[in-house]
Image (cartoon, helix red, strand yellow):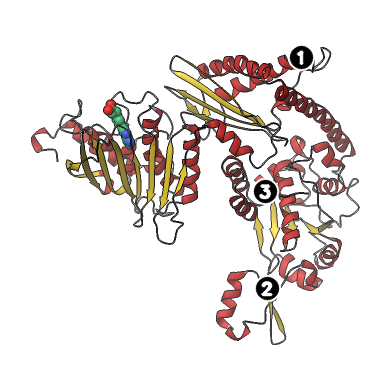
Amino acid sequence: MADLDSYGAKDIQVLEGLEAVRKRPGMYIGSTGLNGLHHLFVEVVDNSVDEAMAGHCDRIDVTLLADGGCRVSDNGRGIPVDPHPKYKNKSGVEVVLSVLHAGGKFGGSGYKMSGGLHGVGVSVVNALSQRLVVEVDRDGQRHRMEFAKGGRPQGGLEVVGKAPRGRTGTTVTFWPDAEVFSSEGTEFRAQTLLEKLQVYAFLNKGLEIRFTDERPGRDAERKVFKYNGGIEDFVRHLNASKESLFKRVGYYSAAEQSQEVEVAFQWNTAYYEAIHSFANGIATNEGGMHEEGFKKALTNAINNYAKAKNLLKEKDDRLLGEDIREGLTAILSVRLTDPQFEGQTKGKLGNVSIRSLMERATNEKLGDWLEEHPTEARQVVQKAIHAARARVAARQAREATRRKSPLEGAGLPGKLTDCSSRNARETELFIVEGDSAGGSAIKARNPMYQAVLPIRGKILNVERARIDRMLKNNEVEALVKAVGAGIGDDFDLGKIRYHKIILMADADVDGSHIRTLLLTFFFRQMEPLVEAGNVYIAQPPLFSVEVGKEKIYLKDEVARERFLAEHPDKRFEFGRLKGLGEMDWQELGETTMDPTRRTLLQISVEQAAIADEVTSVLMGNDVELRKNFITSNASDVRFLDI
Ligand code: 0RA
């Protein structure tokens, strides 16, 4: 502990620093909910990853301890243990752990973060922990220092033994403070941590990251991420669940002064682009200068190649960026000394200099790649030409639907049984699978404000289908007309004819399939509708049981358990309701449509979009995870075949 004589102004500043973090944690970690909690983890791992980036560390071990602690251990140089030049009575370890933003002040790693929530420093973690222990192996010795709640040092840095033969490295173990994270608790979500660790491993070629969950009742199996192919492996992983256009994954990199760019890419046969960009290992979800430079040069390089090889004639229009990027999976990873994170969520890279480097690198090196891989290059150009044709066809198809003006009711589909109210705020559209269930729904509805549209068969898989083909599909056409607000870029939320769009399908496999397809359709083609919370899933009951003369419906397993607790004798008398068709129309009305009795599940776009992104980024072809996602979000249908 600092003795009183040397206890001076600097120590007071240190205390005030950590105090400030505790007063306003949100300023430092964004929130005190689960995101903030996981930010603590990111902050600690970032320091170890920095050591790896600087070339001093090739292994990181993460352990969730049985008692709720989180341990991050690396084999880097170890935090300096000598007295710090500026805080003379404190060791480097103590300074790093208790002075805000002290991480890089030793002139260590050249890639220090700045701005936003990134790189606020491990001292913030200390301030928001109930307890923290740091151990440093350095100079042949093992050092240890402990902090109590809020980052208060418990004694100084002590030598506690020898470092295992020649080992260097840092281990930080922290126990998040339950008082700070009181709203959502201090329990880490293993899946969230694994996803982040996997991305770190992809972005740092050769770095081995291990994860063990020692908490009781969890999956104790150790997970190891290590990718010798770096971002090339990342692209392979993302495309693993898709059909790639060719086997090879392209790669190039370039560096100048204190910045470098790295790109891996491959096309698949699907229609969406998936460009994921990172700056200093941090996801830039809002894009920025690196993406701009890449896109511009990509469009340029492909057009030049296509013209030079006469794949595109002089008279032909240039291929647009969107045509070229259709089906493209790419990872852009850049490193620079002073990254500027801008935008709403600090997810946009603002450094102009990186745009120029990325643009030059892409023009030159992607150009070379195309020359060196003529077979692949030709496939890319052909795909882009197809996409361009489809784009023109889609525009014509959209214009055709617009001319028909579905607005006024004149263009309403024949299968729609509309309601009488014209006040969209109070009306509901039930989209019902199958004609027989449709018939029951029509009988059971309140004709004032409930409309019914039966949908037959399987609508097109919109992930694969193009908009022009999609609009020719009868079911899709009926759906678009009934909703009455257009589609794709032309969709106008202000024109919707019903404020609640309710999907009603069976609880079986086919029902779940059609629900998934419909949700994907809304998510891809009427996103504002989902965003505004206008899409719902009806929840027909899963079980029925007779008590005396009365039939009781139980909506799910929980309700059944609850019922059984009160009626243990009924254990073997349950009917499992498989189909909407198994209920007569009165039952359907009472259990599933009547607003005073039914349960609706509102679909949120956050959930769907984040999950969609996360799924495509991280899950690759992990079928189990994918299935879980489908059941919980139902907005990704890639594994379903039509
Ligand atoms: C400051 C300076 C040096 C390394 C570190 C900090 C460092 C911090 C952490 C946190 C977790 N693991 C870490 N590893 C290293 C450079 C030390 C030197 O120059 O020897």
Camera-side residue: 11 or 583?
583
Secondary structure beneath dot 3 equals loop
**Distance between the alpha carbons at the discs numbered 3 and 2:** 26 Å
Q: From the viewer's perspective, is 308 left or right of 257?
A: right
* Tag in front: 1 or 2: 1
Residue 167 quadrant: top left
Check residue 429 in the rendering and tell me which mark sits there, or answer none.
none
Q: Is residue 102 visible?
A: no
Camera-side residue: 371 or 382?
371
Question: Is the residue 66 above or below the residue 607 in the image?
Answer: below
Q: Amino acid at mark 2?
A: Phe
Q: Residues within 10 Å of mark 3 (few under 14, many from 20)?
A: many
For disc 1, the marked residue is 309
For disc 2, the marked residue is 543
**Distance between the alpha carbons at the discs numbered 1 and 3:** 40 Å
Camera-side residue: 77 or 353?
77
Q: How many marks?
A: 3
Q: Position of residue 158 (x, y in %)?
A: 17, 41
Q: Earlier in the sequence, mark 1 or mark 2?
A: 1
Q: Is residue 398 visible?
A: yes
